[in-house]
Amino acid sequence: MKLSKSFLNNLLIFSLAAMLSLAGCAHDRGAAESRTRVVAKAGKFRVAVYPIDNMSGAFFQMKELRHSWLKKLKELGIDTVDDKTLEATLERHRIRYISGVDSEAALALKVEAGADAVLITSLEYYNDIYPPKIALVSRLTSTGENPRILWMESVGLAGDDSPGLLGLGLIGDFTTLQEMALQRLADSLVSKLNDDGQSCSNMAEGAKYRPKQFYSAFPIDTTKKTTIAVVPFYNDSNRKRVGEIMQTHFTRQLSCLTNVVPIEPGLVREKMLGIRMIMPEGVSIRDVDVLTYILDADFVLSGTVFDYQDPNGGAGTPKIDFSALMINRGERKVIMLSKSYNNGDDGVFFYDVGRENNANVMAGKMSANVVQKMTEEKEPVIHQFAPRRFYDQRPEAM
């Protein structure tokens, strides 16, 4: 019996759809098992969920996004501070800054709201025009007298990231993409709460996102505790708040290193406002002296963002251009200097393989490569500037 070509095509599509459905079911079962483990291990761990900070520069339904995020957290079995208690605490202490937590807010949330940690989430970018895009950054910071970052993750998704065969992987609904992004954040938080050791993914793989220029006086010693204060980058681009965006990306990458403690950005902002520090074109040596003293930090990391583009739709290509530098406390010298710039289609030659559609992912990979280079041993320069011809007539006896 001879089968028609159309019948074979339909059979192939049906088989692929069935395989994708089975894979999705397996993922759902694994996620449910993870949530069950969190319920058992989280115990009385209570989290205050801050209002989500809109860093995208465009209007968005932030309350609905926070409601969806709270729903995910409740599925994980995490006890959250009710909105009435949280709002009363924020109003009582006149806390309006939601991109971080300072010492006063951390202590108030601990004592008055009974929170063990505060969950700070930012909407870096979104676009509901086909193909949709979304980028989120979230971190969990402890409360009390000495707040510190417990977990941090970022996720950037686009509807055309994985079109797959016959376009079956394309996502045209923004709500679906948003749920996927929140689920990835939740899965990462699950790994951290379960101590699975997988809360930090390696984003430094590949060579195309390595810094184009890099200097390091000596590598960071990860065998002992090192404290680094990351200040907002100087914004020389056309997009607002990209200095804070790069600050969060470098803070996340540093938090993945062993024995490296990045200071909570809210504390950095608090101290900078306390001493009325103004950085018109970047950090200075005087700024480093003051910041390292009042924050008890070993290094200060900053830089300049020259370009940060994340175009709408599938026609444009993301583009990022920045420099980073780090100054140490003792010698007051620049011990690291780097220059990075990339387009989303770098190294793409056919069928968009390896193309990045979201600037959030690019920023994560580029900052991860800079941080990785900071931990590597300095490569010695051998014969690079050696003379081609050399004559030396030394006396036999001095």
Image (cartoon, rainbow, N blue to C red):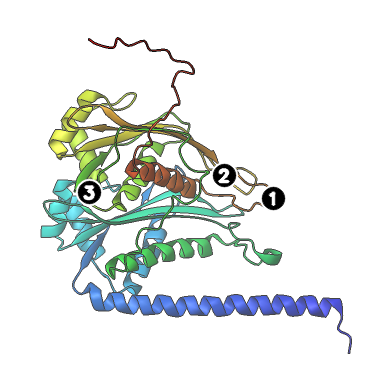
Whether residue 283 sits left or right of residue 386 in the image: it is: left
Whether residue 16 sits left or right of residue 383 in the image: it is: right
Q: Are marks 1 and 2 in contact (CB under 8 Å)?
A: no
Residue 101 bears which disc, if any?
Answer: 3
Assign a secondary structure to mark 2: loop
Residue 169 bears which disc, if any?
Answer: none
Bin the neighbour count of mark 1 within 10 Å (Cα to Cα): few under 14, some 14-19, many 20 and up. Answer: few
Residue 7 location (% of width, % of height): 81, 80
What residue is disc 1 on? Answer: 350
Residue 305 location (% of width, % of height): 42, 33
**Is 33 situated above or below 266?**
below
Amino acid under disc 3: Val
- Image point (32%, 36%), residue name: 232
Real-space CA distance between mark 1 and mark 2, rounded to the nearest whole angstrom: 14 Å
Query: Which badge, 1 or 3, comes first in the chain's sequence?
Result: 3
Name which quarter of the figure residue 138 lies in.
Answer: bottom left
Amino acid under disc 1: Phe
Assign a secondary structure to mark 3: loop
Residue projecting furthest to the front? 396
Query: Which badge, 3 or 2, comes first in the chain's sequence?
Result: 3
Whether residue 81 sits left or right of residue 344 in the image: it is: left
* In-front residue for pair 324/141: 324
Residue projecting furthest to the right? 2
Residue 3 location (% of width, % of height): 86, 84
* Number of dots carrying numbers: 3
What residue is disc 2 on? Answer: 344
